[in-house]
Amino acid sequence: MLAPSAALAQGNVVTVLGVWGGQELEAFQKVMQAFTEKTGIEVQFEGTRDLPTVLETRLQAGNPPDVAAIPGPGAMKQYAERGALVDLSKHLDMDVLAADLGPAWIELGSYGDGFYGLMISADVKSLVWYRPDQFAAKGYEVPATWAEMEALMDQMVANGDTPWAIGVESGAASGWPATDWIEDIMLRTAGPQVYDQWVAHEIPWTDPRVKEAFEVFGKIVRNSDYVYGGPAAVLSTNFGDSVSDLFTDPPRAFMHRQASFITSFIRDANPDVVIGKDVNFFLFPPIKEEHGNPMLGAGDMLAQFNDSPAAAEFMKFMATADAQAIWVGELGKLGTNAKIDPAVYPDDVTRAMAEALAQAEIFRFDGSDSMPAAVGSGAFFEAPLMYIGGEDIDSVLEFLEHAAQEAY
């Protein structure tokens, strides 16, 4: 056995617990290396596939990691409530942080009077993909409001065109693409506060505001004029295949709502397509003006569990544009620091997404990912399949409420 290094004896080591492996771990190792070169502080990464269980065991034993990559703001609030987290505002200059990150990320990482969760990257879901040349040829304009979206859908139908390509088939996870639709709508019809209550099951699934979000989605997905192939095709088409309906000649459909990752599916199926030129995105439009245009997505959040100077230094570093540029540049994710050099991003579309993210005032994590698994990846995946298949909305919501009462 070797004696602990001098650095360890001085507390000059930061331990980080996370789920990253493969390409993500390689990227994070580059970040850790840059931090050590800058500060002389070593970083020890511990990887696990079952982070909540490992973290809980370590907390119970009084031996938490210095820093952990936690599942998101829901988990952050639970740990903060227990007094398990370090308030980052004690060590970080919040004025600088607010200027670098913008309001959405400060709001998302805050709990009570403290700031506990640092988002270092994000993926964006509130995107509608379309082909600019096809829109131009038909005289269609990108909608900036929901009223304009409804008018555009009717204009397309009147022209004999189909507005939407939607596919929710995904093997055992079938239904998840519909949950993203419902979440995006809910944020825009009920607003972020009610959205948070819904995710935490502080309001029931039978609440009229939840019903409204389902019904806005239903007006599209259950209408054969609005969606290619009608409800039957929505249920049987794989989520990765449905976007190809935009690329037939003539197009079977003109719009596809999907997260930023869909560009890789588009490239695989259509190698000649130039992302940003042949296909582009606009933001899912606001529905009720008072709720603005929130952004739905997911991302990587860090929280600090031990109040050590080395851990505080590490968190400070992870908030910087330099650290995030290494992380997102390797992975094609979007940084949360608005000062990242846009050249880090691989193409104009990713740069445009990063810009939209930097301008977002409200960001919310994917709701189904934040719910207990029995609901989030169980009943909530199943319910839209029932609804798209023609089941009555009230019985679908009662099914969800029953599952939620058992799970929360």
Image: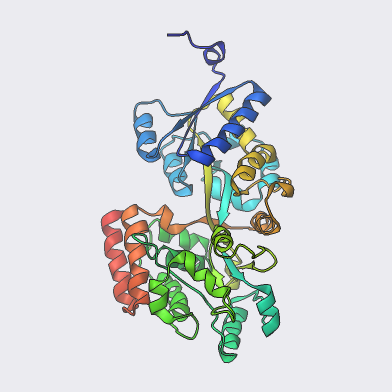
Question: Residue shown at 37%/60% (left/top)?
Answer: 173
Which color scheme did the rendering employ for the protein? rainbow
Q: Residue furthest front?
A: 272
Question: Residue shown at 37%/34% (left/top)?
Answer: 54
Is residue 206 something one can see in this rendering? Answer: no
Left or right: where 228 falls relative to 394: right
Judge by depth and name the residue closer to the eye, 99 or 369. Answer: 369
- As displayed, is residue 157 above or below residue 71? below
Question: Residue shown at 52%/77% (left/top)?
Answer: 164
Position of residue 327 measured from the top left corner of the image (x, y, whole percent): 61, 41
When asked about the image quadrant of residue 406, the answer is: bottom left
Judge by depth and name the residue closer to the eye, 198 or 252. Answer: 252
Question: Residue shown at 58%/77% (left/top)?
Answer: 254
When asked about the image quadrant of residue 256, the answer is: bottom right
Mark count: 0
Instruction: Name the quarter where the N terminus is drawn.
Output: top left
When asked about the image quadrant of residue 308, the answer is: top right
Left or right: where 88 falls relative to 350: left
Judge by depth and name the residue closer to the eye, 403 or 25. Answer: 25
- As displayed, is residue 194 above or below residue 91? below
Position of residue 69 measured from the top left corner of the image (x, y, whole percent): 49, 39
Position of residue 167 measured from the top left corner of the image (x, y, whole percent): 45, 70
- As displayed, is residue 164 above or below residue 106? below
Position of residue 374 measured from the top left corner of the image (x, y, whole percent): 31, 55
Judge by depth and name the residue closer to the eye, 237 or 393. Answer: 237
Is residue 131 something one can see in this rendering? Answer: yes
Left or right: where 310 falls relative to 230: right
